[in-house]
């Protein structure tokens, strides 16, 4: 087993001025499950492909364990890959598909057999070993693709959107299976996805990327609760965090945040920090997660300084919870997540309280989280 | 010559050494021989050019920006020739035979003899009389990472079948011929012999597998074309020409794809036959400007959108982008071209 280290790695394609991956430095611990996440074109797959050896590294160093592997061919990196298009070999049955990589590396037949059967047992596909890929369902094929990687017993697993071809139900199920499997195998895993739910539920640590740069690298909890900038705040969480642009004013010894339809008091601790950083009188962006709006009377009563009134334009009832699309706050629609039994309806005016202890404050110019910036 | 060797040579000569590709005609116009060979050199404005490799009608040349003495030039030419002859003499018997066949295919293609029959002098001829499946593999590996013939041959044999031939064509290009018995080994819907559509589906999967295998082992980019089963002795040259054209069309019209199939590029072949000038004029007349749809992102977006029958959600899923990103791109096309690709 081994960790992976990237030191100031760049990827530049011929004929382009802009790097696809810029100054990427990251230390991935042995046995860690690391998720690379970000929007399309952010460089996450390119980074994974560089680790796999499928793309040349333009600048910087890549270590697997203690070895620099920039110029080592993929087959000699001791990695196993599972990609979105799990091209199973159509002329081989499941057993042969799983055994192929070992056969190529001239493993002994009994060792191949041991590994294939063990992996098949782990993935619960023992009964499929004689079948050809054509006779398998999507989920079964995906498990065979995983099996093909597992039998290699690599130092590092690399997975690029391995669940994208599955339907939603199977994806949820396989998500849990992969997490469990990686914990059991105790192998380093680097997993690429554009799906932030996958990232949040699977990763020990998540790296959020945008335009080839690392935005933040942290545990799911830290990313959710302490995003370093506006991008991470908006990217992690569904529905996304609401952003309200407004002004901070000092009134009667308290700091208030005023935006269209919003006039709330900033808690003392945060207010002190804003004062010390010279934000009073300036425009900032306040981020509120949908679940930090409250319609419960007890909460409203206890939060007289953070009440807002809005009109429900659209409501989506998911049964256990409801998404309310509110008009009249800030420039865009604001989404609140409330209890499914709240009994509210569209076009109704609603009184809500914001949990001000959980708001996020962003500098309007730099888009950095004011509370996280030193 | 790879980057490391170029740097070594540059340090040794204390002069810049730059790799170039010239046509035989350019070589001749600059004072070179009509039939150039590896090790030939010419002086051109205080620059010495030496041929390091031949690739069909193209010459791989290094350009040394320095006035070398006659002895230096001769020593350099001798070293390059030795390096070239050593790699050929080290080759296995099978590799030599395969290279011989590859050279014959290449010569026939260059001279336009697409229907040429394999002469008796080609030693592998007897292995080309039964039905085979062809694949054309074009790689873009840097020289030091490219697999050797034996390594690649063994890997591909392990992958498909022992009854497989690997034939080097140009540099970074191989023809793979494997027995068509592979098809009957794949379970079909109760039939012993797969029908045409099933065969095409299997060939596509095999080509995908081949692509994954080559990139997974050696990294780098590569392109694979697959053809339908045929008897090589009857139409080998034409087949190679078709597969080469398929890769060319696939790369031109289906940016981002690595597996190309001749039966999927009929329209592309037709479009490609229209001269560039006529095409530009058509686009300019229809859209008012000639530079539309040229960036790879727009092309791959449209390609995916049409292949998913203009279904926005499915296209977004295929491209791994958010639905809104796709809608934004389609709106941008509408704004720039005045064409709404969502409604014909």
Image: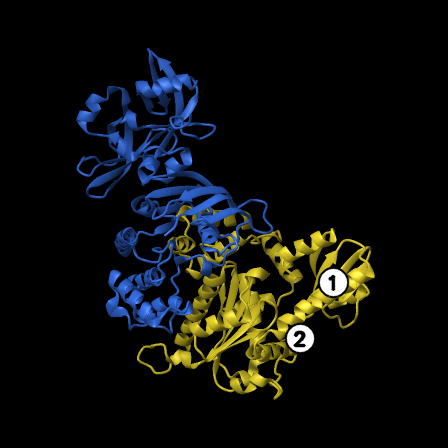
Drawn side of residue A98 relative to residue B158, left or right: left
Which quadrant of the view contains residue A142?
bottom left
Q: Colour of chain A?
A: blue
Task: Check disc 2 and report its element: helix, strand or loop.
Answer: helix
Drawn side of residue A18 relative to residue A328, left or right: right
The answer to whether residue A211 is above or below residue A45 is: above
**Residue sitting farthest toward the top:** A252
**Marks 2 & 1 on one chain:** yes
Drawn side of residue A157 relative to residue B58, left or right: left
Task: Check disc 1 and report its element: helix, strand or loop.
Answer: helix
- Residue count near mark 1 (Cα–Cα under 10 Å), binned few <14, some 14–19, many ≥20: some
Q: Which residue position holds label 1?
A: B76
The answer to whether residue A358 is above or below residue B32 is: above
**Chain identifier, yellow in the render:** B
Work out whether mark 2 precedes mark 1 in sequence or the reverse, and give the earlier one: 1
Camera-nearest residue between A15 and B88: B88
Q: Label 2 is found on which chain of the structure? A: B
Residue A232 numbered mark, or none = none
Q: Label 1 is found on which chain of the structure? A: B
Indicate the position of residue A223 as horizontal and vertical percent values.
35, 37
- Residue count near mark 2 (Cα–Cα under 10 Å), binned few <14, some 14–19, many ≥20: few
- Residue shown at 67% from the left, 56% from the top: B6
Q: Which residue position holds label 2?
A: B110
Compute the Cα span from label 2 to label 1: 30 Å
Drawn side of residue A324 relative to residue A372, left or right: left
Indicate the position of residue A38 as horizontal and vertical percent values.
41, 44
């Amino acid at each position: 087993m081994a960790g992976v280290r990237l030191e100031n790695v760049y990827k530049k394609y011929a004929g382009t001025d802009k790097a696809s991956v810029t100054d990427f430095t990251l230390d991935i611990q042995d046995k860690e499950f690391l998720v690379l996440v970000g929007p399309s074109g952010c460089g996450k797959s390119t980074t994974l492909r560089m680790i796999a050896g499928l793309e040349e590294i333009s600048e910087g160093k890549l270590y697997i364990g203690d070895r620099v592997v920039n110029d080592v061919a993929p087959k000699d990196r001791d990695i196993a890959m599972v990609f979105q298009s799990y091209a199973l070999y159509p002329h081989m049955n499941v057993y042969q598909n799983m055994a192929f990589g070992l056969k190529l590396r001239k493993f002994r037949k009994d060792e191949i057999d041991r590994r294939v059967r063990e992996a098949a047992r782990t993935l619960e596909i023992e009964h499929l070993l004689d079948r050809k890929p054509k006779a398998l369902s999507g989920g079964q094929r995906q498990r065979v693709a995983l099996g093909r990687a597992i039998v290699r017993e690599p130092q590092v697993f690399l997975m690029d959107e391995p669940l994208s071809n599955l339907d939603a139900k199977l994806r949820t199920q396989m998500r849990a299976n992969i997490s469990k499997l990686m914990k059991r195998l105790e192998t380093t895993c680097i997993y690429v996805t554009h799906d932030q739910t996958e990232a949040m539920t699977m990763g020990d640590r998540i790296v959020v990327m945008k335009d080839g740069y690392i935005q933040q690298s942290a545990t799911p909890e830290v990313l959710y609760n302490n995003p370093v900038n506006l991008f991470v705040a908006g990217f992690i969480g569904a529905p996304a965090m609401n952003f309200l642009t407004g002004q901070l004013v000092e009134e009667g010894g308290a700091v208030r945040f005023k935006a269209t339809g919003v006039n709330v008091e900033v808690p003392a601790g945060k207010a002190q920090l804003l004062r010390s950083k010279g934000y009073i009188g300036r425009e900032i962006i306040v981020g509120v997660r949908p679940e930090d709006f409250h319609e419960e009377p007890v909460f409203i009563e206890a939060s007289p300084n953070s009440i807002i009134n809005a009109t429900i334009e659209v409501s989506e009832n998911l049964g256990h919870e409801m998404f309310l699309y509110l008009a009249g706050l800030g420039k865009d629609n604001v989404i609140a997540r409330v209890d499914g039994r709240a009994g509210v309806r569209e076009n109704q005016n609603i009184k809500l309280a914001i949990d001000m202890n959980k708001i996020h404050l962003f500098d309007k110019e730099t888009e950095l989280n004011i509370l996280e910036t030193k | 010559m790879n980057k490391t060797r170029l740097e070594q040579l540059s340090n040794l000569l204390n002069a810049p050494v730059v790799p170039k590709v010239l046509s035989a005609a350019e070589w001749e116009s600059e004072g070179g021989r009509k039939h150039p060979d590896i090790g030939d050199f010419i002086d051109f404005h205080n620059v010495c050019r030496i041929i390091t490799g031949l690739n069909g009608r193209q010459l791989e040349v290094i350009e040394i920006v320095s006035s070398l003495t006659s002895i230096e030039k001769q020593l350099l030419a001798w070293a390059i020739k030795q390096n070239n002859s050593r790699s050929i003499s080290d080759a296995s018997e099978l590799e030599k035979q395969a290279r011989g066949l590859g050279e014959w295919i290449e010569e026939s293609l260059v001279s336009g003899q697409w229907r040429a029959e394999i002469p008796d002098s080609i030693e592998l001829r007897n292995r080309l009389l039964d039905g085979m499946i062809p694949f054309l593999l074009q790689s873009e590996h840097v020289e030091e990472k490219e697999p050797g013939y034996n390594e690649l041959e063994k890997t591909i044999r392990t992958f498909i079948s022992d009854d497989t031939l690997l034939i080097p064509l140009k540099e970074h290009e191989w023809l793979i011929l494997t027995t068509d018995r592979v098809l009957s080994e794949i379970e079909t819907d109760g039939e012993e012999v797969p029908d045409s559509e099933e065969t095409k589906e299997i060939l596509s999967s095999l080509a995908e597998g081949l692509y994954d295998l080559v990139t997974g082992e050696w990294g780098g980019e590569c392109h694979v074309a697959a053809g339908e089963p045929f008897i090589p002795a009857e139409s080998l040259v034409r087949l190679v020409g078709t597969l080469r054209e398929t890769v060319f069309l696939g790369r031109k019209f289906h940016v981002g794809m690595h597996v190309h199939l001749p039966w999927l590029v009929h329209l592309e072949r037709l479009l490609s036959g229209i001269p560039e000038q006529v095409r530009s004029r058509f686009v300019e007349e229809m859209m008012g400007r000639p530079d539309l749809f040229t960036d790879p992102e727009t092309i791959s977006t449209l390609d995916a959108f049409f292949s998913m029958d203009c279904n926005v959600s499915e296209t977004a899923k295929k491209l791994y982008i958010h639905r809104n990103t796709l809608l934004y791109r389609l709106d941008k096309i509408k704004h720039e071209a005045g064409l709404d690709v969502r409604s014909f």
